[in-house]
């Protein structure tokens, strides 16, 4: 009994600490555009949301997709086309991107979901490559040129997204809403089943859960949220190109997630921020970005497998354990 | 042995049956023409030497493996081609020979996951985890029945081997199944837990069918109403304990294994 109260007490104080950190983080993001170039921040936020959506699948369902560029880049194309060619308002274009990505997720998930481990990764990669070649060929994507000059327009015909601060706070709002949605899914009754599938798939089956359906649902949710990130990115940068549907992009989101920490809420955000920041810093130096990210990847796998945030969490918990242990003894 | 038959145990319907069950692995026949009837309100032990095919029979009955041939009926329905999750939802629950738990969930959450399916609580992705709070009293009841209350907030991975098995049984019972398949439930348990779990199995078997693989013959003698002996994929003998124990072929198969 005493142990239970102790644990609950500790859990409560640590969740209060977490809440404090979240509030601090949001305040920092609100103030950030006055100190840092907003376009860089917005790029970080888009990739951070993308990585969080990816982590919903890898970290909380245990599925490694190697085809997530399809949803990110696909949604960017759908949104850019709708806004530029059909003259849709930005919110409608983004919605189309999300729905389109969910549709692509349903198709890819349908073919991949019954495979395990490396076979799952390979099928998602193969389907993503098919989508890439489709994008190279399809007229509406304009091949190597991509869709350029997408107007940002007015959000709900009210807010002029050409104003740097307006669009920054819009992107921040989408980011926060997206991360909240992911947090809600992970910490929901449904999320509990996803975790149990990650922990022991056969056991989940023996409890009567049709795991393929749960995985497919998680896959589509992850695809839709990745699409949200990609569509918003198209509005921010006013273009959609082949870069976002390449396999390198699928690899990059894996790297960001691993670097920050799989299965942690904040890890992918930190990982995305670091990778985008690094790319930005290296862009002017002429040092090949591929080599830098490759080295980071190796360091991740060899030195800190839990990722930056995962490693910090583990150390923090270990210290708490030992301190409360000492108290109990003393 | 069965005590004085009470109201429930008079009802001896066959709830799970297999006919001509066979499973090949490449050229090897792991289960060969097995017929099996599992009755309501009875504890049925499936015994046999290592590699006899007991676990494979479990995997076939629960549809974790496809039978090469044969037919399986659960509660009067043909389940031979049904997926395993659907069979589980019909009321056939199993435990695994190698403990199957959710290691990085708490003990309490392990049991609650099993309670979550009825009432659509497993698909709600928009509600907070506190939606599961109403399952907690029932989960605590089950944990209390198996003696895991003191570790309910621990991660399952931190339990001892024996207590992991106990947790798996609690999780299986949470499904309130009509047919319960237990694959060596007592393996690796301490003496005290064996007693608790024996009592528990006896009490849950009043309202349902239990099929149990068990190597500990004293437990088998103590608990089971009916016994099927397997050897090299085939059924060697079936009957109550005295009948089976008197069978010459069973004696040969179990030579040197008899514990009392
Ligand atoms: N997936 C498989 N592939 C190939 N052979 C298998 C497979 N599963 C089981 N077998 C073989 O089938 C035979 C029966 O195995 P099974 O696990 O059913 O035995 P068992 O009676 O449960 O034994 P134990 O008492 O050791 O648990 C063994 O020879 C085993 O090697
Ligand atoms: Mg076995």
Image: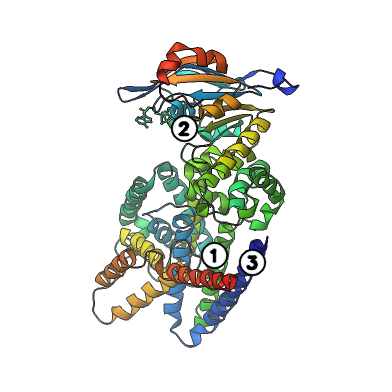
The answer to whether residue A316 is left or right of residue B192 is left
For mark 1, does the 10 Å Cα neighbourhood hold few (<14), some (14 to 19), or many (20 or more) residues? many
Q: Which of marks 1 and 3 is nearer the N terminus?
A: 3
Q: Is mark 2 within 8 Å of ligand 1?
A: no
Report the residue marked by disc 3. A6
**Which dot, 2 or 1, sits closer to the camera?**
2
Q: Which residue is drawn at 59% across and 51% down?
A: B107
Seen as rendered, the residue at the extreme front is B260
**Neighbour tally class for label 3: few under 14, some 14-19, many 20 plus, Cα within 10 Å:** few
Q: Position of residue A44 (x, y in %)?
A: 43, 73
Q: Where is residue B154 in the image (x, y as percent from the top left)?
A: 57, 56
Q: How far apart in space, not on screen, are marks 2 and 3 (Cα)?
A: 42 Å
Element under label 2? loop
Q: Marks 3 and 2: in contact by CB < 8 Å?
A: no
A147 versus B47 height, above or below: below
Q: Nearer the viewer, residue A208 or A110?
A: A208
Report x, y in % for residue A316: 49, 72
Q: Which of marks 1 and 3 is in front?
A: 3
Element type at mark 1: helix
> Which residue position holds label 1?
A178
The image's mark for residue A167 is: none
* Residue under label 2: B64
């Amino acid at each position: 009994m005493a142990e239970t109260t102790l644990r609950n007490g500790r859990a409560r104080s640590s969740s209060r600490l977490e809440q404090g950190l979240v509030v601090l983080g949001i305040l920092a993001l609100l103030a950030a555009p006055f100190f840092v170039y907003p376009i860089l921040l917005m790029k970080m936020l888009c990739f951070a949301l993308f990585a969080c959506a990816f982590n919903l699948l890898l970290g909380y369902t245990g599925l490694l997709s190697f085809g997530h560029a399809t949803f990110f880049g696909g949604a960017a194309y759908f949104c850019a086309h709708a806004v530029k060619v059909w003259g849709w308002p930005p919110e409608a274009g983004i919605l189309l991107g999300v729905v389109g990505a969910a549709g692509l997720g349903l198709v890819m998930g349908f073919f991949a979901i019954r495979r395990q481990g490396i076979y799952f990764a390979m099928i998602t990669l193969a389907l993503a490559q098919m989508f890439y070649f489709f994008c190279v060929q399809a007229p509406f994507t304009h091949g190597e040129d991509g869709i350029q000059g997408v107007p940002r327009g007015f959000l709900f015909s009210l807010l002029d997204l050409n104003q740097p601060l307006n669009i920054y706070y819009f992107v921040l709002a989408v980011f926060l809403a997206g991360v909240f949605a992911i947090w809600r899914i992970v910490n929901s009754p449904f999320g509990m089943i996803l975790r149990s599938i990650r922990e022991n798939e056969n056991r989940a089956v023996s409890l009567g859960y049709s795991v393929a359906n749960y995985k497919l649902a998680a896959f589509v949710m992850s695809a839709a949220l990745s699409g949200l990130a990609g569509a918003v990115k198209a509005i921010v940068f006013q273009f959609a190109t082949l870069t976002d549907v390449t396999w390198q992009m699928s690899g990059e989101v894996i790297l960001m997630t691993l670097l920050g920490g799989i299965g942690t809420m904040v890890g992918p955000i930190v990982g995305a921020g670091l990778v985008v920041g690094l790319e930005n810093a290296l862009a002017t130096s002429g040092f090949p970005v591929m080599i830098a990210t490759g080295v980071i990847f190796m360091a991740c796998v060899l030195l800190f497998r839990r990722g930056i945030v995962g490693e910090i969490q583990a150390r923090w918990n270990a210290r708490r354990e030992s301190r409360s242990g000492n108290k109990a003894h003393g | 042995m069965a005590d004085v038959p009470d109201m429930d145990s008079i009802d001896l319907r066959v709830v799970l049956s297999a006919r001509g069950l066979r499973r090949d692995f490449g050229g090897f026949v792991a289960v060969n023409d097995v017929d099996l009837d599992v009755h309501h309100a009875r504890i049925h032990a499936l015994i046999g030497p290592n590699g006899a095919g007991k676990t494979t029979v479990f995997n076939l009955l629960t549809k974790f493996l496809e039978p090469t041939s044969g037919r399986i009926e659960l509660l009067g329905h043909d389940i031979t081609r049904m997926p395993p999750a659907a069979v589980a939802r019909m009321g056939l629950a199993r435990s695994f020979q190698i403990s199957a738990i959710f290691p990085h969930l708490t003990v309490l959450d392990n049991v609650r996951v099993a309670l979550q399916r009825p009432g659509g609580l497993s698909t709600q992705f928009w509600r907070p985890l506190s939606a599961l709070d109403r399952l907690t009293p029932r989960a605590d009841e089950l944990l209390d029945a198996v003696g895991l209350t003191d570790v309910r907030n621990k991660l399952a991975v931190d339990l001892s081997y024996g207590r992991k098995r106990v947790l798996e049984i609690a999780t299986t019972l949470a499904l309130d199944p009509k047919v319960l398949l237990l694959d060596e439930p007592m393996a690796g348990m301490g003496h005290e837990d064996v007693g608790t779990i024996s009592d528990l199995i006896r009490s849950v078997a009043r309202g349902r069918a239990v099929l149990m693989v068990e190597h500990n013959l004293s437990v088998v003698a103590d608990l089971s109403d009916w016994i099927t002996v397997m050897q090299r994929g085939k059924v060697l003998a079936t009957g109550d304990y005295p009948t089976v124990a008197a069978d010459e072929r069973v004696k040969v198969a179990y030579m040197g294994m008899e514990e009392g």
